[in-house]
Amino acid sequence: MHLLALAMLTATPPSPVAVDAFLQEFAETRRYLSGRPVGAKLTPDGSAVLFLRSQPKDARQMLFEFDVKSGQTKELLTPEALLQGAAETLTAAEKARLERMRVSARGFTSFQLSADGKRLLVALSGKLYVVERATAKVLALKTGDGACLDPKFSADGASVAYVRNHDVHVVELSKNVERPVTQGGTEVRPHGLAEFVAQEEMSRFQGFWFSPDGAQVLFQETDQAGVERFAVADPLHPEAEVDRFHYPRPGRKNAAVKLGLVPLKGGRPTWVTWDAAAFPYLATVKWPAKGALTLVVQNREQTKEQILAVDPKTGATKVLLTEEDAAWLNLAQEFPAWLPDGSGFFWMSEKSGTSDIELRRADGSLDAVWVKDVHGYDGHTKYLIGYSEKDAALFVFTGPNPTESYVAKVTKGGKPERVTGKLPSPALETGASVVGELMLVTTASSTAMPKTVVLKKDGTIVGELPSVALEPSLKPNLTLLQLKTGQRSWAAVLKPKGFTAGKKYPVILNVYAGPGHLEVTQTLRENLVLQWLADQGFIVVKLDGRGTPRRGRDFERAIKGDFATVTAADQLDGLKALAAEVPELDLTRVGVYGWSFGGYMAALLGLAHGDQLKSAVAGAPVVDWLDYDTHYTERYLGVPPAAAKAYDVSSVLTYVDRAKRPLLLIHGTADDNVYFLHSLKLSDALFKAGKPHAVLPLANFTHMVPDPIVTQRLWQRIAGFFKETL
């Protein structure tokens, strides 16, 4: 892969910035994540933890087992052992699925554990393998041609189902013979796969589900007829075939989704019925061992949703609960969560203004508000970890402020009590699970990279999954604080090496400012390269204003119908408030950088507020929200054409005529989330308006940039641009 410079319209070349040892190592280690345990799962009997891990400078992950009692770790399986010298290959569909899941690793990217813990299921190069843990014996499943997507065990572990060539197939492991479960799937109307917006915006990656007894399969049929198809071409290889993806834009046709119930042995489906005209989005599906087969469906505006119980015999549904919000409803995929005995389910609601977990009876009626204000919605961290029947307690994430997150235990109506007090704090605890008397917790802090720890439910530390990762050679000079004025936003400040009190420094505002994401948290990993950037002679700052999570419903929903005004005001006002507390900030020399929604905000601030900002770097920016996807955009801005005003005020194109400061646009030409058309559209408008700018296309890259060389060159270019302009 190469960098392809289409337009370099800056008046002078950027100042050179050397690639030092840190930046090279940062890039070669996948931002210091390679070599760290990921995807950890406790076995049902609590005797072991299975996890994936690569070498320190290798993206290929292998499978390991950690013995809880002895603390010893052994290697279970490697990609090389399965491929026997062959190269790993991925189809376009597999690459797209990993992109939706934001997975940059290769080798084993996930694994399944059978319900009894005796068997493992892994996928590699589109093929499936079942491993007997006791003997390490590997069974290569005899599947037909084509990649096997979304594989999973049946409840009894006797079968494996997956999607191949647009239909669900199953292999009974005792026979190792493939047979179809569904029939008639096509590229336009596939069976068993979640549609694009479900994967990208709902965090629902499954499109079929086994019944608890393994006798039936519930599958999704997605009718994509009439949905626009976007082409992704490789500009370095115009002779190559292009990949095409169905991509629904705001106000235009969405995929039509329905569900069918079919016997595992195959047959005619029984279709599930609900008011799909009123509730076209299938947001969540749960089929618990006890309790109802349950759906969460939403209206297109995402202001109303229903929890439905499905009769598996007839496909008929009944409404258990209706939830409404005048602005929008947040989705949390762990809900509804049924009690082990099926007598009720947990549900998250924000109707009180805070994020509350309710216990609902099986008929949907309210039993109790189990815990109030558990944490606040965050698109990256779950609320609910699990329920302990023995303790009659929920395990949840909560924290004293938006920057911190901890595992807590809460009984009915009680207050959350942190159970990880023996782990460091302040910290950001994210991934967690509870099995029997044990917990797995992944924790990180502003001084330590992520680690995964095994604990007892009382907080006693049992062991830590071993890492072979390189530790960062750079330590951030980080300060977190809550501003005293304005919206009292949370802020982070990264000071350069050799910082001198009283000296004025140019400022780089690292921005996201969008819903479902926080920039200011207790984390080292997210600040490493920003500290490197600060060490080039800047103070780097981050601010989380209105629209960001964990500050309550109203704080988050202040951006409804307008991405541009409130968000920009909070960033600019926050800079002024921060300068009152950190006088070394030179507000006459401020640049802004961001990626994705942050790229949008960087471009918006750079164009619309050039009187307060001197330059901007916008990575993979959404430029015109009419060109982004339906489920995300319509949630916040409304459905066109009725919401035309919201799209106009939120479009970067609206502010092109105000442009007067240097702008660098960076975008992957193969991006299938924020398509390259966004940066081209903005560049075209700026060029025609006579506004100088620079464009740096990343040839054949998607929304992620995992390549080590390109990562180094990218940050060199960003630092050089700010040296030149600030």
Image: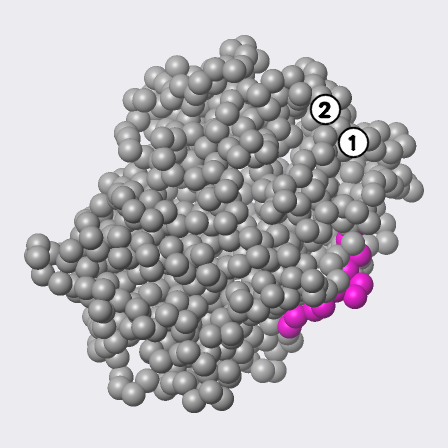
Location of residue 122 (image quadrant): top right
On the image, numbered disc 1 is attached to which residue?
319
Real-space Cα separation, disc 2 to disc 1, in angstroms: 8 Å
Q: Amino acid at mark 1?
A: Val
Q: Residue furthest front?
A: 486
The answer to whether residue 567 is visible is: yes
Q: Position of residue 526 (x, y in %)?
A: 33, 50
On the image, numbered disc 2 is attached to which residue?
364
Residue contact between numbered discs 2 and 1, judged by CB atoms under 8 Å: yes
Numbered range of the magenta stretch: 221-231
Q: Nearer the viewer, residue 669 or 34?
A: 669
Q: Nearer the viewer, residue 299 or 139?
A: 299
- Mark 2 neighbour class, 10 Å CA radius: few under 14, some 14 to 19, many 20 or more: some
Q: Is residue 657 above or below residue 624?
A: below
The answer to whether residue 20 is visible is: no
Find numbered disc 1 in the image and state the secondary structure of the residue it sits on: strand
Q: Quadrant of the C terminus?
A: bottom left
Q: Is residue 427 above or below residue 623?
A: above
Residue name at image x 33 percent, y 60 percent: 572
Q: Quadrant of the N terminus?
A: bottom left
Q: Is residue 461 left or right of residue 678?
A: left
Q: Residue furthest top?
A: 390
Residue name at image x 78 percent, y 31 percent: 319
